[in-house]
Amino acid sequence: MKKPNLLFVEDTEAIRIMTLKALAPYFNIVEAINGQEASNIIQLNTKFDCLLTDFELGDMDGLDIALEFRKWNVDPPIVLTTGSPLTNSRIQTLLKMPNTNLVEKPFNIEILKNLLFKLTLIDLAP
């Protein structure tokens, strides 16, 4: 079975390492540590099956990344992780985009993994 291509954007090293370790057996992961790097990757590689991004990245936020992603990848799901208040207007705007999901930090890696499996149609049944 072909692994789905996942763009993973996270600026916190500990979260990035933990998440990469858990997801690497199931996904071809391209990682970015900030919004500008993610934007460059999106423009060079338009073949992603899913975007997993933190909301607060310092140089950009998850809405900026999602809008850039949608320019090149219309259908694939977006999963936003955040510890920000859900009342943030930019988070609310992002959640109104089609096929967009939210996982609050701190997150359980198994819940995140299962959501990504569902969204990318990975079936782990024997």
Image: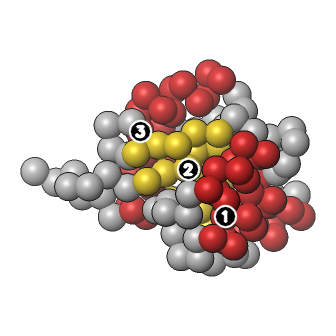
Q: Which mark is residue 69?
A: 1
User: Badge 2: few (under 14), some or many (20 or more) residues near its Cα, within 10 Å?
Assistant: many
Residue 52, x across and y down, in percent: 58, 51
Mark before the other along the chain sequence, 1 or 3:
3
Residue 3 left/right relative to 51: left
Mark 3, residue position: 23
Mark 2, residue position: 7
Residue 100 left/right relative to 29: right
Q: CA distance from mark 2 to mark 1?
A: 10 Å
The secondary element bearing badge 3 is classed as helix
| Contact between labelled residues 1 and 2, with CB atoms less than 8 Å apart | yes
User: Badge 1: few (under 14), some or many (20 or more) residues near its Cα, within 10 Å?
Assistant: many
- What residue type is disc 3 on? Leu
> From the image, which quarter does the N terminus lie in?
bottom left
| Contact between labelled residues 3 and 1, with CB atoms less than 8 Å apart | no
Q: Quadrant of residue 120?
A: bottom left
Q: Which mark is residue 113?
A: none
- What residue type is disc 2 on? Leu
Residue 82, x across and y down, in percent: 72, 46
Q: Which mark is in front, 2 or 3? A: 2
Question: Is 79 located above or below residue 105 in the figure?
Answer: below
Residue at 58% over, 70% down:
73
User: Is residue 103 visible to the viewer in this orientation of the structure?
Assistant: no
Q: Quadrant of residue 86?
A: bottom right
Residue at 48% over, 32% down:
20
